[in-house]
Image (tube, rainbow, N blue to C red):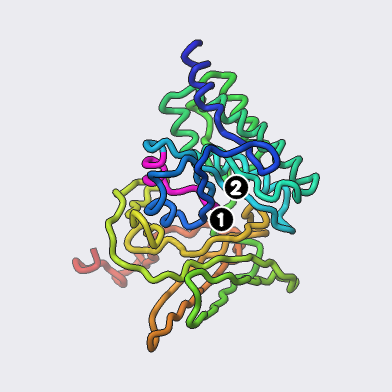
Amino acid sequence: MIAINFAAALLSSFAFLHPNSDKLAEPVLFEDDIVKAFTNSCDEIASLVTREIPPPHMMATYRKLGVKVYARYRYHKGVEPEFVRRAVGFIPFSQDADGVWLEDFDKYPPEWKAAVAAAKADVAAAEKLKAIGGNKVGWWFSVVDFSRIDCDVLRAKCIEYAAKGDIPGTLPVQPCLEDPDYCDLPTQNIVMTFTNCADFVKTRLELKTKDKKTVFYDLLIDARPAYPEPRAPSLVTDKMWVTVGFRLRPCYERGYGILHQRVIFDPQYRTFSPSYPKPHFRVDLKMVDGRREVRLSASVKEKLPVQAKKPDMFEMDASSGLNELEDFDL
């Protein structure tokens, strides 16, 4: 019991900070370029505030240097409170952040502040479960999709499992979710080209529903040229992708040389779902006559009707001598 309480004390440090109240440990670096922060300042700062949490291999170094890392979340008109709750709670907590920095907190509308209060309760429940420790609890936190499962369901599971003292081995890891590769929007592909652009390109993607309504996404494209550099160790994820990544930039690669996307949502307005799908992106960058050309391709796939599964075999007429199998057919 003492060990559990001690662990809970260690894990209760996830902080919800904002300019009007709490202070960050000095010196503080506000920097959204994770690589720049890592290479230039990681040995001389006490707190890093950044838009995205650094990848695990960088976080390990920050931990060893005693640097606290906080996810920066600023006010954006139009972002739904449900996603605010997720973005300042379960998502940064599952990425091992030390907390969130609620920028522009005085501009947050009442429904956003209510979402922050709900996120605090979410994190408190997750901390109690994580304090139990053990391989099964660690495994659960590594495989659950905190970016899409309903936050009320996630909090209820954390409370339930914490009360039981472990993760039940006979229960499913998470609720069944619809395949994120397919959506309620019609299949469509949009290509945009940017010439002689800056290192980061801000643009808006507009997709159409079947009744011609617009579903839009605000995007930030990393248009910096790639260059050779050391790679991070290979990892095998829960979905059995073999991942090899650059230690610094440009981001990561997944699988057999398939680039992890250079696109982030800035901001993301809602939790991704069939009605608000996450597009698939491809970014191609090349130099043309000394000028940089960036080509962005974005696509979504329509969810098709369920069809009866066809047998995985070919048909042949076995009643006659026709279609007999020869050795080279085997």
Say which amino acid is labelled 2: Arg
The numbered mark at residue 8 is none
Q: Is residue 237 visible?
A: no
Is 8 situated left or right of 317 in this image?
right
- Secondary-structure class at tag 2: loop
Say which residue appears at 42% left-offset and 57% top-offset.
36
- Residue 177 left/right relative to 121: left
Magenta run includes residue 5: no
Q: Residue furthest left?
A: 327
Q: Which residues are magenta?
A: 50-62
- The residue furthest right is 110
Dot 1: element: loop
Residue 199 at what x, y percent from top left? Answer: 47, 71
Residue at 37% x, 45% y is 57
Residue at the disc numbered 1: 180
| Percent of width and height locating residue 49 | 54, 47
Callout 1, which amino acid? Answer: Pro
84 above or below 295? above
* Closer to us: 241 or 107: 107
Reading the image, the residue beneath label 2 is: 148
User: Of tags 2 and 1, which is closer to the observer?
Assistant: 2
Whether tag 2 and tag 1 are in contact, CB under 8 A, the answer is yes
Q: Is residue 68 visible?
A: yes
| Image: 117 above or below 135 | below
